[in-house]
Amino acid sequence: MTIKDVAEYSGVSITTISRVLNNHPDVREEVRAKVLKAIEELHYVPNSSARDLSKTQTDTIGVVVRGAGNPFLNSVLRSIETAVRKANYSMVMCQIGSSEDEISEGASLVRSKRLKGLIFLGGRFDYTPEQIATLSVPFVCCTYTNSFGSLNRKAYSSVYIDDYAEAFRSVKTLTNLGHKKIAVLLGTTCDRSISELRFKGYCDALESEGISLDKNLIIEAKSFHIDDAFKAVENFLKKNKDFTAIFSIADAMGIAAIKALYNAGLKVPEDCSLISIDGIEVSKYTIPTLTTFVQPIEKMGRYAVEILLDVLNNNRGNCQLKVETLLREGGTLAKPKNLIFTP
Amino acid sequence: MTIKDVAEYSGVSITTISRVLNNHPDVREEVRAKVLKAIEELHYVPNSSARDLSKTQTDTIGVVVRGAGNPFLNSVLRSIETAVRKANYSMVMCQIGSSEDEISEGASLVRSKRLKGLIFLGGRFDYTPEQIATLSVPFVCCTYTNSFGSLNRKAYSSVYIDDYAEAFRSVKTLTNLGHKKIAVLLGTTCDRSISELRFKGYCDALESEGISLDKNLIIEAKSFHIDDAFKAVENFLKKNKDFTAIFSIADAMGIAAIKALYNAGLKVPEDCSLISIDGIEVSKYTIPTLTTFVQPIEKMGRYAVEILLDVLNNNRGNCQLKVETLLREGGTLAKPKNLIFTP
DNA sequence: AGAAAAACTGAAAACGTTTTCAGTTTCTTA
DNA sequence: TAAGAAACTGAAAACGTTTTCAGTTTTTCT
């Protein structure tokens, strides 16, 4: 069942069928109706491979996601998929690990699948203009961060939160309660993670309170994965008890921290306060409920798609959209009390 | 950059390039090496639209997933994507809600995207042979269950656990500890969920112990979503205190249950034991750690893809693969003690 | 009524592969 | 060493669309 069959059936040329299919204006109403009827009667569905080949582009956008295991990213990914399908596009996704980089994976995806656009999700976007230029299609970063000294944000489209400011704010929430000895739980920075900016926010917040950075209070997990975070906190607790709060840069890590603290006999929030950033669903159900700055997950995915389609269809220039988090108060914050354990 | 450029560059015909690309045997080693080198040097990537058009089929498989929000399904989905990409196929995903059915969504996906095969993930597969026949491509159910009285499992390929037996076993674990008053936490059955078979396993396990079914101990959540599960347990606890254990049919719901019990002042496992099925990552970090029958998540996704590709490429017939869960002992099991609260 | 403009239509050439089939080499074997 | 077989190669036809360009109608205007 091809366009040719429809053409014969309805007595016009395949060109006309194609025009009807693509809503070209140059078709008489009468003919259009006849063709539509034929399409209906024959249950004709266009062959998208042929269409794509002919157009030298597909109606597909790619999503390159770093660290897809993270529940936060997973939720964003789902909202992206929903938005993409609603716009009659389709989505291919490509999970990458720490050894790959988003530009080259994205570029090869674009080439092989003839994608129309790309969304980068998760990780850190710190490529040079030259690297970016190897991407031949528009793209949007729906991602945690870019890093200091790298490409200016204006050079590409993005949906993002101000990692630095959000981290600063988180730590301030702790210092406002009187905390001075605040540990930070990071995914290691060497895997292109978001840690750098949030860490800087942490440092500066401390500094603004006249607290000097204590290297012993940096908990660096091997990755963002909950298991690694748990191990990191567990090891940290073996050596260090001189702190009253932890700032976790992601909910999944915060959940691991609660457990590790519990296992070590430390009560949250009495012995240790905890705050983090993300707002994944399950963090509403920890004991106590995780206090966290919630990112507008659904919105972020949807906006990323909207921006991309806008650039694609209306030839818009780059667009940067900063979104804000919202504090979800749980039960992991308290004023510091005298430390039970002293070094 | 097309196959033609590669042909010119390496001084052979496009036919030969195509043969190298497709691993045809009829190419001299020497020539093959030369072509490969040219491909490498030119950074040539085949145009998949053209390839698909020529082959009259795409190298794409579709995944129709019901209830993608569930962390368990999400993990399976990721392992499917990984396996699909490793096999040089690509994947399009289609999330469906309670109002859509998998067959018709799948069928329209196949038609419009020229898919080669389909995987159904999550939900319950209970279609008639007539409905199945509307699907023109092979498919695999990587899904919780099919239901009683519906199509026989032999009629299609699947990767599955024996929901009935696993539920039976879970409840037996509780009765072996001495529990008699065991509640069950279900997602409502009216949304094509997995509840039916697991519920039957629960009922029969009780019966085998001479315990009669107490309708008051059925906690039916509006959906599998953690929020709905939480509300359901919360409501349940307001009315009912006469039980010593809960069997939750999914980890996400179990996590909600822990929190609801905690909020109600009930200790797990002292006041209420809890067991569930799934083995999602975060359930290792609840307090106490959730005791659960872990499904081989990565394996299930990978096998689903392998089976599908096997059917596709080797014209194999249907294949049913039953996998087993493995108990992960956490801290949510204890012998029943005298009830603190009596009705 | 005739000419110019507008509206519509179709033939044919792309798009970049795979595959068929007919050839050309190179190897075996008697 | 000739002949037949095996191994390799390439020209050309498909795959099903979109798009360009050259018509052909129909409308509009004087």
Image: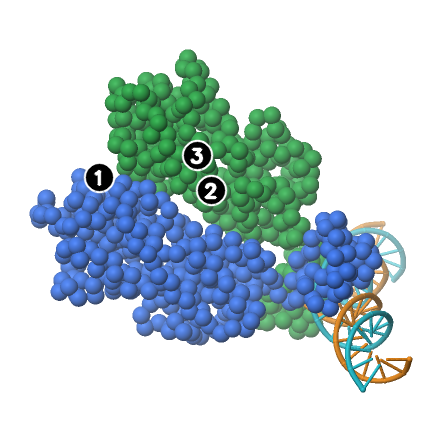
Chain colours: A green, B blue, C cyan, D orange
Residue at image point 57% right, 59% down = B87
In what element is the residue under mark 1? Answer: helix
Residue at image point 66% right, 72% down = A5
Where the C terminus of chain A falls, by quadrant?
top left
Label number found at residue B341: none
Looking at this view, name the residue that lies furthest to the top. Answer: A210
Quarter of image, res D2: bottom right
Is label 3 on the same chain as label 1? Answer: no
Residue at image point 56% right, 65% down = B116
Say which chain tag 2 marks: A
The residue labelled by disc 3 is A221
Residue at image point 56% right, 55% down = B85
Residue B244 at what x, y percent from top left?
15, 50
The residue labelled by disc 1 is B263
Say which chain tag 1 marks: B
The residue labelled by disc 2 is A73
On screen, residue A181 above or below B49: above
Inspect the image, locate mark 2, and give the three-letter code of the amino acid beneath it: Leu
Residue B255 at what x, y percent from top left?
29, 46
Compute the Cα span from label 1 to label 2.
29 Å
Are the residues flagged by discs 3 and 1 in contact, CB closer than 8 Å?
no
Inspect the image, locate mark 1, and give the three-letter code of the amino acid beneath it: Asn
Inspect the image, locate mark 3, and give the three-letter code of the amino acid beneath it: Ala
Compute the Cα span from label 3 to label 1.
31 Å
Question: For the residues carrying marks 3 and 1, which lies nearer the camera in this image?
Answer: 3
In what element is the residue under mark 2? Answer: helix
